[in-house]
C-alpha cells in the first residue's frame, strides 16, 4: 500500500459521523410511524371480513307474504300416506292448488329446517322429499325462481349436503342459497323482545315464502314446528334469544307471515331435540299437515310429541297477539288418507 492509499484508509477510519439532532430524530421517527400506520390500515381494510360501509345501513321491514283468505278452502289439511310427493300434491289440491299461492313470475323462497349435520333418517331436518315436491309444484305454477335457504347451526354446506336437501332442491329446479357473513340486512322485527336484528337478505328479495318445518322435540321450548322454524332467518347471536325463548318465538311468528306452511311429520324426532342423532328417538308418522294458521299447525303437532297446549307457553302468547288459534279443530279442516304407492 503506497502513502496515498494509507492516507485514504486513515481518513475513513478516523472520520466521525455528525450526531443527529433531536429534531431530526423526531422527524424520522414520525415518518416511520406514519408509514407503518398507513400499511396497517391498508391491511385492515384490504383483508377485513366486513364490507366497508360509507353510509349508515338502512333498517328494513319484512313484507307480509300472505295471500288473501278464501273461505271456499279449508284452513288446515292433514294428509297421511307413504308417498311424499303425492301427499304434498294432495295437500295443495285440498287447499285450492299451488296456483292459489304462487303466480307466474313470482320469486319464491322455501324455508325448511336445515339446522343440523344429520341424515334424513335422523329427522333433525326437513325431509328432502318434501322440499323437492314443493319446489316442483312452485315451478309448475310458473314461479320464475325458487330458492331454498336456512341459517344452519352446524356447518351450512355439510348440513345441506348430508340432509339431502341440496341435491333434492337442485333436482327439482330450485337454487340453494347459503347465507354468507355479509348476506344479512338489519331488520325491524317490531317485537316485544326482538327489535332490530340481522335477517338473511333473501327474505327481502322474494315475492312469496313457504315455511317447511319438521316436527321435533326441543329441549327449551318443548317443541319446534312452524313458529320456531323462523329462528333460521336470523343472523347474529341468536342463542341470546333462548333466555326468553317463548317470547322470541312469538315475535318471530309475528314478523314472518308466510304464504303457506307445510309441516313435515313424515319422521318425528320425539326426544333429544332439536339435533337428535339416534334413530331410537325417531318415529315414522307418514303425515303432512298444511295450512295458513301456524298457531293451529303447531298445536296439531303436539300429540306427536306427547305434549299439550298448556305445556307450550308460546301458543297462548301467540293467540293473545292475534296470530291464530291453538284450537285447530275449531277451524275448517280436512283429513285424507292416501293409498300405498
Image (cartoon, rainbow, N blue to C red):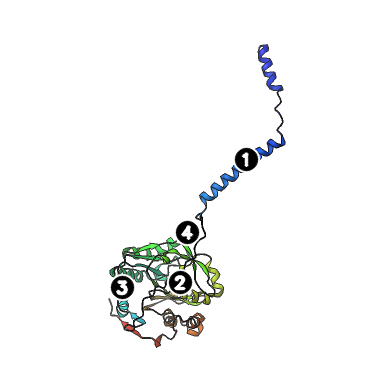
User: Which of the two residues, 221 or 248, is positioned nearer the viewer here?
Assistant: 248
Q: Secondary structure at mark 1?
A: helix
| Labels 3, 2: front one | 2
Q: Are marks 1 and 4 in contact (CB under 8 Å)?
A: no
| Labels 1, 2: front one | 1
What residue does disc 2 label?
230
CA distance for labels 3 and 4: 35 Å
Q: Earlier in the sequence, mark 4 or mark 2?
A: 4
Q: Earlier in the sequence, mark 3 or mark 1?
A: 1
What residue does disc 4 label?
182
Report whether 286 appears left or right of 153. Answer: left
Q: Position of residue 89 (x, y in %)?
A: 30, 75
CA distance for labels 3 and 1: 69 Å
How many neighbours does mark 2 have within 10 angstroms: few (below 14), some (14-19), or many (20 or more)?
Answer: many
Which residue appears farthest toward the bottom when viewing the image? 330
Q: Earlier in the sequence, mark 3 or mark 2?
A: 3
From the viewer's perspective, is residue 20 above or below residue 261? above
Q: Earlier in the sequence, mark 1 or mark 2?
A: 1
Q: Which mark is residue 32?
A: 1
How many neighbours does mark 3 have within 10 angstroms: few (below 14), some (14-19), or many (20 or more)?
Answer: some
Locate the C terminus and report the quarter of the image it occupies: bottom left
CA distance for labels 1 and 4: 35 Å
CA distance for labels 3 and 2: 24 Å
Q: Secondary structure at mark 3?
A: helix
Amino acid at each position: 500500500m503506497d502513502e496515498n492509499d494509507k492516507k485514504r484508509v486513515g481518513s475513513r477510519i478516523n472520520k466521525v459521523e455528525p450526531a443527529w439532532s433531536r429534531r431530526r430524530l423526531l422527524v424520522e421517527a414520525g415518518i416511520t410511524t406514519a408509514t407503518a400506520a398507513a400499511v396497517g390500515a391498508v391491511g385492515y381494510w384490504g383483508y377485513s371480513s366486513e364490507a366497508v360501509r360509507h353510509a349508515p345501513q338502512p333498517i328494513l321491514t319484512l313484507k307480509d307474504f300472505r295471500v288473501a283468505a278464501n273461505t271456499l278452502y279449508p284452513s288446515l289439511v292433514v294428509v297421511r300416506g307413504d308417498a311424499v310427493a303425492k301427499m304434498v300434491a294432495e295437500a295443495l289440491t285440498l287447499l285450492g292448488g299451488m296456483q292459489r299461492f304462487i303466480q307466474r313470475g313470482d320469486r319464491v323462497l322455501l324455508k325448511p329446517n336445515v339446522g343440523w349435520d344429520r341424515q334424513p333418517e335422523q329427522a333433525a331436518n326437513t325431509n328432502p322429499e318434501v322440499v323437492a315436491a314443493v319446489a316442483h309444484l312452485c315451478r309448475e305454477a310458473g314461479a320464475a325462481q325458487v330458492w331454498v335457504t336456512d341459517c344452519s347451526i352446524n356447518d351450512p354446506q355439510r348440513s345441506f349436503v348430508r340432509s339431502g336437501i341440496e341435491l333434492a332442491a337442485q333436482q327439482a329446479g330450485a337454487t340453494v342459497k347459503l347465507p354468507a357473513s355479509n348476506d344479512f340486512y338489519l331488520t325491524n322485527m317490531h317485537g316485544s323482545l326482538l327489535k332490530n336484528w340481522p335477517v338473511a337478505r333473501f327474505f327481502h328479495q322474494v315475492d312469496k315464502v313457504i315455511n317447511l318445518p319438521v316436527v321435533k322435540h326441543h329441549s327449551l321450548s318443548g317443541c319446534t314446528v312452524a313458529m320456531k322454524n323462523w329462528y333460521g332467518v336470523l343472523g347474529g347471536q341468536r342463542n341470546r334469544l333462548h333466555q326468553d325463548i317463548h317470547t322470541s318465538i312469538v315475535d318471530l311468528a309475528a314478523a314472518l307471515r308466510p304464504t303457506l306452511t307445510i309441516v313435515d311429520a313424515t319422521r318425528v324426532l320425539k326426544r333429544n331435540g332439536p339435533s337428535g342423532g339416534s334413530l331410537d328417538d325417531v318415529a315414522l308418522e307418514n303425515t303432512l299437515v298444511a295450512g295458513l294458521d301456524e298457531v293451529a299447525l303447531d298445536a296439531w303437532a303436539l300429540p306427536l310429541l306427547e305434549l299439550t297446549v298448556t305445556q307450550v307457553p308460546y301458543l297462548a302468547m301467540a293467540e293473545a297477539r292475534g296470530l291464530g288459534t291453538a284450537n285447530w279443530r275449531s277451524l275448517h279442516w280436512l283429513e285424507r288418507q292416501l293409498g300405498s304407492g
